[in-house]
Amino acid sequence: MIRIVVDAMGGDYAPREIVRGAVEGGRGRDIEVVLVGRREAVEKELSGCDLNEVRINTCWAEETVGMSEDPVQAIRRKPNSSIAVGIKLIKNSHSSAFVSGGNTGAVAAAALLTLGKKKGISRPALSIVLTSPSGPVLFLDVGANPNCKPQHLVQFAEMGNIYMKRIFNISEPRIGLLSNGEEDTKGNKLARATHQLLSKGRLNFLGNVEGQDLPRGKADVVVTDGFTGNVVIKLGEGLGEVFAELSKQAVDNNPLFREAQRRILNYTALGGALLLGVKGNVIITHGKSDAGAIKQAIRLAEQMVEQRVAEAIGH
Amino acid sequence: MIRIVVDAMGGDYAPREIVRGAVEGGRGRDIEVVLVGRREAVEKELSGCDLNEVRINTCWAEETVGMSEDPVQAIRRKPNSSIAVGIKLIKNSHSSAFVSGGNTGAVAAAALLTLGKKKGISRPALSIVLTSPSGPVLFLDVGANPNCKPQHLVQFAEMGNIYMKRIFNISEPRIGLLSNGEEDTKGNKLARATHQLLSKGRLNFLGNVEGQDLPRGKADVVVTDGFTGNVVIKLGEGLGEVFAELSKQAVDNNPLFREAQRRILNYTALGGALLLGVKGNVIITHGKSDAGAIKQAIRLAEQMVEQRVAEAIGH
């Protein structure tokens, strides 16, 4: 049976929204949901939930990692944190996934230290699915690797290719390289060298894509270094928030507008970020996730297990 | 007298909107506006304009540079293009400025080849003014230099500091370095080395700022390399356009919404981009500029001359 391990303590609205979302995510499905966290807090929230048709299990972890703690130190010093315990629960299990809205760096550090990298992958990448009018776009790396070499970006493209094939059933995902112009000659040194490698490779490489092509969905997978990728997703969030404030009074009650706003605000939030390239299925949700977003993340985790994404990447 | 030289042939709506905007920009002000372009086209548009209280002059240039032409080759091969001729008209004149909505690379190449760099500036930078709830933000480089060294970013900060002092009267502009986290230790190699240099410098350096801080206006000047900067502004444009499409039906007739939309769409368009660091005042407007945008660019050009921006930068 598929087992989804959920960090009950991670995120701005933990544990309440996480526990509720986890219960809803498990209801009526053939999966086991394991909540990891402080006994008192988790039991209190669970007591208010309808547990019909849900397989819920619990695992107590009395420590928590703060959002501003140093990731590697936190994982080393807090072996009983919900992140460290949760990651251990999915070790060596292809049928498990871990979902957390906690300190992103700490989840990545725990995954690297405990699960390890897949063979053939030098740098696991934090990856998000953006929405676009022409379908989902996988964008990576969004922050795990601020300094990259061309071969790292090629590996990102290979991982993204597998993800979009398996999760979205795209037979030959179109791969784009984020650059400052669409011509082959555009790019910084990293982008130009990566362009040469991808041109010679076996993927369906479209060439360079520009900033405006990301929300338009010109490619199915867009690769960049973790510095540029991080700036891009945070700008998207910031623009969405500024827009929401500016237009709040104007159009709060118009349903079509609310849908448009939701799509810009949720620009980074189609289920959560994925840590691709480690030996395991690891999903990092946005800190602001509510029960609905956690439910969505659990569906995504289930799909990643079913479609054997982590198994298919590297060796 | 201040002389503003305008490329009548540059931009998607040239020459009509450019000529009209130039006439409106000159009306009632103590400036001379010089239109550079094809005689037949410019005369035709001028014949439809009210020329009361405007000092308009013309300079014929029968060639034009296409948007996809190689910048340096185009300038070398087309000495009679409106860009090459226009730039020559402002050479060695502190009281002149050049405004063009044509091929950005070609304008930059003509400025570098004909005007030259200011002493002390290794890399002139393409710079834009973003709007934010807390005031204007100068953002550079947005594309002139895809590969930068730390000292180049320091020079960008110095140029931005002068610009914001002189054009927006900010006594000690707050300088931010775009990075993938606000902590000093965040950044790729370039950002971390730049952080060290700016920390030791004499500017009002705030430290790292993140993607979401750009539209929020956390700093008055934000510096980055031209690769990242280009991706950022194009993403802003793309998101604005996608948003406009999504919400068109919903709220087209609501004035508060239209204002919010205008602010996101015009995210990159407060008067035009500035080529800072060359010996002259050079403004590059957005290709989609209409007469209103050109009028705004002419006001900006006038301010740059009055405030002696190009003179104050470097030596």
Image (tube, coloured by chain):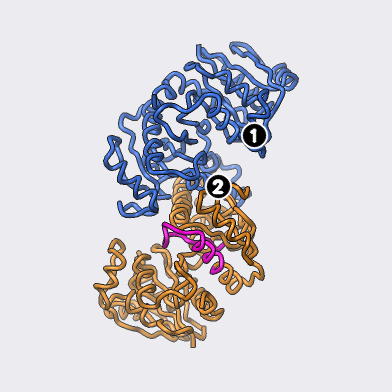
Chain colours: A orange, B blue
What is the tally of numbered marks visible in this picture?
2
The single residue placed furthest to the bottom in the displayed view is A1
Number of the label disc, if any, that sits on residue A180: 2
Nearest the viewer among A108 and B73 is: B73
Mark in front: 2 vs 1: 1
Secondary structure state at the residue bearing disc 1: helix
Magenta range: A137-159
Residue at image point 39% right, 78% down:
A115
- Label 1 marks a residue whose chain is B
Q: Is residue A87 above or below residue B29?
A: below
**Residue B186, horizontal then vertical, whole percent:** 34, 54
Amino acid found under the numbered disc labelled 1:
Gln
Specify the amino acid type for callout 2. Asn
User: Which residue is pictured at 42% across the width and 61% down the height?
Assistant: A145
Q: Nearer the viewer, residue B67 or A218?
A: B67
Q: Is residue B234 above or below residue A97?
A: above
| Spot occupied by residue B66 in the image (x, y as percentages of width and height) | 68, 34
Task: Report the residue marked by disc 1.
Answer: B73
Name the residue at 61% across, 71% down. Answer: A165
Q: Is residue B114 left or right of residue A103?
A: right
Vertical comparison of A74 with B196: above or below: below
